[in-house]
Amino acid sequence: MNGLFGGSNEPRHPRPPHIKYKVGQVVKHKLHNYRGVIVGWDEKVKAPDWWIKRVHGTEEIDEPNYTIIIDTRDRLVPQIAYVLERNVILSEGFIVHPLINHYFESFDGKCYKSRPWHKNVYPND
């Protein structure tokens, strides 16, 4: 992802206080109703200009964006989404997705625990 769409491996430290959600939290999309788990975030959108224009039009986007792996019970084909903070709310339950074990080593019933390499990128989540 070359640093775009929440894919940078640069450590997010210190954690900005305005980032509402954390890596490993289970969320639900307010508009599209799918569930997922946060695997990354950016303080504000980091995507190619063409993508931003296609998704957001001319709206100025100055809020956190989250990379979410979507539960395959809600989308049959495994998908990853890049979502504005205003469009997600906390949810519950485990997520089914082939990348879960890539990012996380366990689930405590509320939140996923990042693998060490992922925790290095998001040390305060």
Image (cartoon, rainbow, N blue to C red):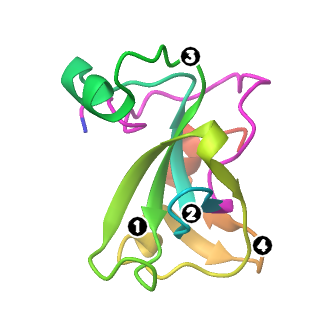
Residue at mark 2 to residue at mark 1: CA–CA distance: 13 Å
The earlier-in-sequence mark between 4 and 3 is 3
Check the image and report above or below for 66 versus 30: above
The earlier-in-sequence mark between 1 and 4 is 1
Question: Is 120 placed left or right of 20 in the picture?
Answer: left
Residue sitting at 59 percent across and 29 percent down? 64
Q: What secondary structure is found at the residue carrying circle 4?
A: loop
Q: Which residue is mark 4?
A: 110
Residue sitting at 32 percent across and 65 percent down? 79
Residue at mark 1 to residue at mark 4: CA–CA distance: 18 Å
Q: Which residue is mark 2?
A: 37
Q: Amino acid at mark 4?
A: Lys
- Indicate the quadrant containing the N terminus: top left, top right, bottom left or bottom right: top left
Task: State the mark number for residue 62.
Answer: 3
Q: Amino acid at mark 3?
A: Asp
Q: Quadrant of residue 16?
A: top right
Residue at mark 1 to residue at mark 3: CA–CA distance: 30 Å
Q: Nearer the viewer, residue 115 or 32?
A: 32
Q: Amino acid at mark 1?
A: His
Q: Nearer the viewer, mark 2 or mark 1?
A: 2
Q: Nearer the viewer, residue 34 or 95?
A: 34
Q: Amino acid at mark 2?
A: Val
Q: Nearer the viewer, mark 4 or mark 3?
A: 3
Mark 1–mark 3 CB contact (< 8 Å): no
Check the image and report above or below for 28 versus 1: below
Q: What secondary structure is found at the residue carrying circle 2?
A: strand
The earlier-in-sequence mark between 2 and 1 is 2
Mark 4–mark 3 CB contact (< 8 Å): no
Q: Nearer the viewer, mark 2 or mark 3?
A: 3
> What span is in magenta?
2-27
Q: Nearer the viewer, residue 93 or 12?
A: 93
